Image (tube, rainbow, N blue to C red):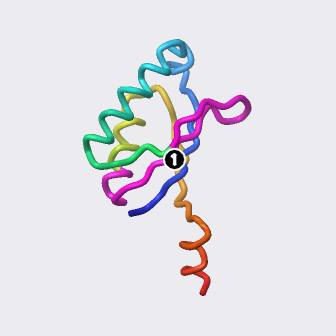
């Protein structure tokens, strides 16, 4: 299983409908969990980015979920793989 950190930025459409963001996030969480992706964390932030997602699952399933999220038009995403200490230790030796 892979872990990904995704930074979210509202599009103009997402910003216009910002009050619906918590309910959209819940719908997203339920849908991706049915598809086998675990939502470890969903946060809204203030600053350059508007939110953070931490997802865990099969690479293809996670990336499919994120492309479907972006296709809805409310957020743009920037995604990167993330590792805990044990995983990183195995990578670097």
| Residue lying farthest to the bottom in this orientation | 93
| Residue lying farthest to the right in this orientation | 47
Residue 35 at what x, y percent from top left?
Answer: 26, 45
Stretch of the chain drawn in magenta = 41-63
68, above or below 84, in the image: above
The answer to whether residue 22 is left or right of residue 72 is right
Of residue 82 and residue 14, the one placed in the foreground of this image is 82
Q: Tell me which residue sits at (55%, 47%) in the image.
A: 78
Of residue 50 and residue 26, the one placed in the foreground of this image is 26
| Residue tagged 1 | 54
Quadrant the C terminus occupies: bottom right
Quadrant the N terminus occupies: bottom left
Q: How many numbered discs, if any?
A: 1
Secondary structure under tag 1 reads strand
Q: Tell me which residue sits at (32%, 41%) in the image.
A: 33
Q: Tell me which residue sits at (73%, 31%) in the image.
A: 47
74, above or below 43, in the image: above
């Amino acid at each position: 299983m892979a872990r990904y950190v995704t930074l979210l930025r509202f599009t103009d459409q997402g910003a216009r409908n910002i009050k619906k963001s918590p309910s959209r996030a819940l719908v997203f969480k339920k849908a991706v969990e049915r598809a086998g992706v675990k939502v470890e964390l969903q946060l809204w932030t203030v600053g350059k980015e508007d939110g953070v997602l931490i997802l865990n699952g099969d690479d293809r399933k996670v990336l499919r979920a994120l492309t479907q999220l972006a296709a809805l038009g409310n957020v743009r995403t920037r995604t990167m793989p993330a590792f805990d200490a044990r995983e990183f230790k195995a990578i670097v030796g």
